[in-house]
Amino acid sequence: MNTLEQAKQEDLERCWELISQGREFQREQGFVQWTEDYPSRAIIENDIRIGKGYVLKVDGEIAGYMYIDFDGEPAYEDIRGEWQSQEPYAVVHRLAFGREFRGRGLTDTAFQLIKDLCLSKNVRYIRGDTDFPNKRMQHIFKKNGFKNCGIIVYQGDKLAFDRLL
């Protein structure tokens, strides 16, 4: 059984491990989106403290980590391009999975559970972004019904994606 749950303080070590593995995986893919400074352990700890860090559990085991925010993203206010909507949205950042869970289609599962979470909060719109070299995340966005809307600036230029639910 797969569930999406708010991360708890006792999940911090596993969440940090997932982010670290995600950083390594990016380097193995030949690019650097997550630097040694971002995302930091303090950022992940803060995500959890403020209730915006989430874990994807597979049969009770934490397989993935992500940040989901329903309060908007200031970097998204200025886009070279155009968002599909201006209605309230959820933003998804810092999506990472444990290496032992890769190749199981869990990104599709995660986005279905994120969609369900959004709809439970009466939010019908999701935004996200990724670096230009991160072809894997671009593919994941497109595969999960997201549209490339343009470019935003957040620690450099990023490809902006959104999806109406």
Image (cartoon, rainbow, N blue to C red):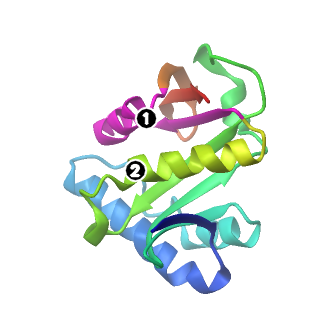
Disc on res. 144 = 1
Q: What numbered label is drawn on residue 107?
A: 2
Answer left or right for 15 relative to 121: left
Q: Earlier in the sequence, mark 1 or mark 2?
A: 2
- Residue sitting farthest toward the top: 81
Label 1 sits on a secondary structure element that is loop
Tell me residue 135's x, y (percent).
Answer: 29, 36
- Rendered image quadrant of residue 130: top left
Q: Which is more toward the observer, 3 or 77?
A: 3
Near-viewer residue (33 or 105): 105
* Tag 1–tag 2 contact (CB < 8 Å): yes
- Looking at the image, which is closer to me, 25 or 139? 139
Callout 2: 10 Å neighbours few (<14), some, many (20+)? Answer: many
Residue 117 screen position, x and y as percent: 66, 50
Which residue lies at the image location 62% right of the left edge and 47% below the top edge? 116
For label 2, the SS is: helix
| Real-space CA distance between mark 1 and mark 2, rounded to the nearest whole angstrom | 9 Å
